[in-house]
Each structure stands twice: as structure tokens, then as C-alpha cells.
């Protein structure tokens, strides 16, 4: 018997089940109900008094609903006498709003940190946070674990390959994978218009000609960054392009444009559930459950 219990939010039920299975425990029983007007009500259905508890919930779409549900779960655990309440957020939302990009904007990543702390969570664990800067907003211990080991075996096996960061923000992550599989690293210089969202590749660092290129990124949202990167890399002679991206948000037309793109394979993780209708042949899902199980065990 572990000395903690795990409760799953609705966005992370499958992943939480896998984590619990690895740890040899069952998920904590809870009820999550939505009223006709959209309001959420949660209830813990087992004794948690004097027990450390984890809530696992990704902040993927519907982001705000998932965030509030997470807060309600935390609150009810605290009210029911849990010794400590911790939170594991496999995909932490609002992370791209980690600075004031334009005058007058909200610092949303910090607001999320404040909300979670106010609920009473005493520790936050996430996977491949968009930028380390986000963790600095937390006064409680905030840890981001890397999903790279989940990708490593998939990115190996081809001698003539290199790892590519699609923008400067992804270089650290690309270096980590490159080190693990013994490949060289390149990166693209990308520019995004903050109002239209339009992306431009300004420069390519690294020689990709006749190589298998593994693009590493933290998330696929609209898919625009990856499709553009793939097109640019193909033009300069990359022979095969594979993607390792942690968080499959896959919003808007992402699935359609990724299917049509020159990308041969797109490997993502299960930090965000991908419904059947969004799954396609080129998409492969690897699990971060072993990584999360290990960190929950260590941090409990
Ligand atoms: C950007 O800074 C991120 O790391 C991702 O590259 C980006 O958010 C992906 O968004 P999209 O799929 O919409 O291009």
C-alpha cells in the first residue's frame, strides 16, 4: 500500500489510471457532476483524512473548466482532512502567457500559480513545461519532469539523422534528446505575429541535407509551427522528417494540415488525451505514465 492516494480529474482519467496501475494502487473514488448551466460539483467518495493526496488533471481544452474542476477537487480533499494535497498537471495550460508580450496584457501563467496555491496545493508537478520561467511564479515547490526518455527509443535507429528545434525556445529540449540518442542539433529562427498568429522561418541553423530530421517541440497546438518547419526543411533537402512533441493539443485544423504535411511520423505523449476521431495513421502516442509514477512516488 502506498502512503498516498491519487484522484483523477476528467481530463486525465486514462493517464491517472495508468499511473495508479504502475504504482499498484487504485484511483481514489470521486464524483464529478456538471449541472445544466455548466457549473461543476465534485465530491470525494472515500476517506482521505491524514493521507497525502495527488490530483492529476491536465489543463487542456476546455482549459478553464478543467482548471476550475481541479481547484474544486483540491478544495474538497483539503476540507475532508487530507494531510497534504499535491497536484500533477501533465499539461500545464496558460504557459505561453508567461510574460507580458504586449503592454496591457495579463500575466496569466502567474495567475494560475496563485489560484493553485490559494486552493492549498503544496506541490505542483508538470511535464515539459513550456518555459522554466513559469515555474518561478510558484511559491510552492514546482517541478517539471522531462518526457524525453519516452521519445528516446523512437528517435533512435537511423544513423544519418539530426535533432531540430523549431524555435529558440525548444533548443534545450532538442539538446536533451540529441544527447540521449547521440545526434547533432540544429534550430530554426521563427517569428510569430502576436496578433495574427502567422509564423515565418527566418533562418536555419544546421545542415539538414539528406538527413532524417527529428523536430522536437513541447506542444502541437494548431500544427502551424511544425508544418511550416517541415516544409522549410524539405526545401533545403531533409530526406525524412519526424516529430517528437509532448503535448498534443491538436486544435482547429491541426489534424488536417498534419496529415497533408511532409511529416512522416508524429510522436506525441498522453499528457493530453487524443480522442479517436483525432487519431490518424502518422500519429503515434507514447505514455508518460512511468515518468509520472516515478516522480509522484519520489515527491510524496
Ligand atoms: C511555441 O513557442 C511553442 O513551443 C510551440 O511551438 C507552439 O505553441 C506550437 O503552436 P502551433 O502548433 O499553433 O504552431
Image: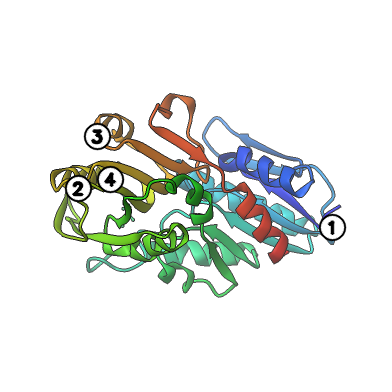
**Residue 31, which numbered label?**
none
Answer whether residue 250 is visible to the viewer in this image. no
Helix or strand or loop: what does disc 1 sit on? loop
Pointer 2 with pointer 4, Cβ within 8 A: no
Q: Which residue is mark 2?
A: 233
The CA distance from mark 3 to mark 1 is 52 Å
Q: Position of residue 170 (x, y in %)?
A: 34, 61
Task: Please name whichever residue, 128 or 179, is drawn nearer the observer in this view of the structure.
Answer: 179
- The disc, 3 or 1, on the residue closer to the chain's N-terminal end is 1
Considering the image in quadrants, where does the C terminus appear?
A: bottom right
Q: Which residue is outermost to the top?
A: 277
Residue at the spot 59% in from the left edge and 63% down from the top edge: 124
Task: Please name whichever residue, 8 or 157, is drawn nearer the observer in this view of the structure.
Answer: 157
Task: Please name whichever residue, 79 or 223, is drawn nearer the observer in this view of the structure.
Answer: 223
**Residue 261, which numbered label?**
3
Q: Which residue is mark 4?
A: 226
Q: Is residue 134 above or below residue 150?
A: below
Question: Which coloring applies here?
Answer: rainbow
Task: Report the mark closest to the observer, 2 or 3.
Answer: 2
Q: Which residue is outermost to the front?
A: 159
Question: Is the C-beta of the residue carrying label 4 under 8 Å from the nearest atom of ligand 1?
Answer: yes
Task: Report the mark closest to the observer, 1 or 2.
Answer: 2
Question: Is the C-beta of the residue carrying label 1 under 8 Å from the nearest atom of ligand 1?
Answer: no
Pointer 2 with pointer 3, Cβ within 8 A: no
Categorize mark 4 by other alpha carbons within 10 Å: few (<14), some (14-19), many (20+).
many
Q: Which residue is mark 1?
A: 49
The CA distance from mark 2 to mark 4 is 10 Å
- The disc, 4 or 3, on the residue closer to the chain's N-terminal end is 4
- The disc, 2 or 3, on the residue closer to the chain's N-terminal end is 2
Pointer 4 with pointer 3, Cβ within 8 A: yes
Amino acid at each position: 500500500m502506498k502512503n498516498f492516494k491519487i484522484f483523477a480529474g476528467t481530463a486525465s482519467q486514462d493517464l491517472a489510471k495508468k499511473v495508479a496501475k504502475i504504482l499498484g494502487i487504485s484511483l481514489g473514488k470521486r464524483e464529478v457532476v456538471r449541472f445544466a448551466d455548466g457549473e461543476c460539483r465534485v465530491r470525494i467518495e472515500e476517506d482521505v483524512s491524514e493521507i497525502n493526496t495527488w490530483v492529476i488533471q491536465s489543463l487542456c481544452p476546455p482549459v478553464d473548466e478543467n482548471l476550475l474542476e481541479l481547484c474544486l477537487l483540491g478544495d474538497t480533499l483539503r476540507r475532508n482532512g487530507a494531510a497534504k494535497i499535491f497536484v500533477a498537471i501533465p499539461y500545464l495550460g496558460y504557459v505561453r502567457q508567461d510574460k507580458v508580450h504586449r503592454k496591457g496584457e495579463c500575466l496569466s501563467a502567474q495567475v494560475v500559480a496563485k489560484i493553485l496555491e490559494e486552493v492549498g496545493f503544496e506541490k505542483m508537478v508538470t511535464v515539459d513545461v513550456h518555459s522554466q520561467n513559469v515555474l518561478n511564479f510558484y511559491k510552492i515547490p514546482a517541478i517539471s519532469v522531462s518526457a524525453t526518455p519516452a521519445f528516446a527509443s523512437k528517435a533512435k535507429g537511423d544513423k544519418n539523422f539530426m535533432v531540430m528545434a523549431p524555435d529558440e525556445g525548444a533548443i534545450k529540449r532538442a539538446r536533451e534528446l540529441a544527447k540521449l540518442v547521440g545526434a547533432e542539433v540544429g534550430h530554426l529562427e521563427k517569428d510569430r505575429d502576436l496578433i495574427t498568429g502567422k509564423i515565418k522561418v527566418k533562418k536555419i541553423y544546421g545542415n539538414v541535407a539528406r538527413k532524417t530530421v527529428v523536430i522536437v517541440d513541447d506542444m502541437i497546438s494548431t500544427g502551424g509551427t511544425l508544418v511550416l518547419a517541415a516544409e522549410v526543411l524539405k526545401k533545403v533537402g531533409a530526406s525524412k522528417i519526424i516529430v517528437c512533441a509532448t503535448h498534443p493539443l491538436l486544435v482547429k485544423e491541426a489534424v488536417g494540415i498534419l496529415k497533408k504535411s511532409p511529416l512522416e511520423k508524429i510522436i506525441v505523449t498522453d499528457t493530453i488525451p487524443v480522442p479517436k476521431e483525432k487519431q490518424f495513421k502518422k500519429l503515434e502516442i507514447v505514455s508518460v505514465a512511468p515518468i509520472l509514477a516515478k516522480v509522484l512516488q519520489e515527491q510524496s
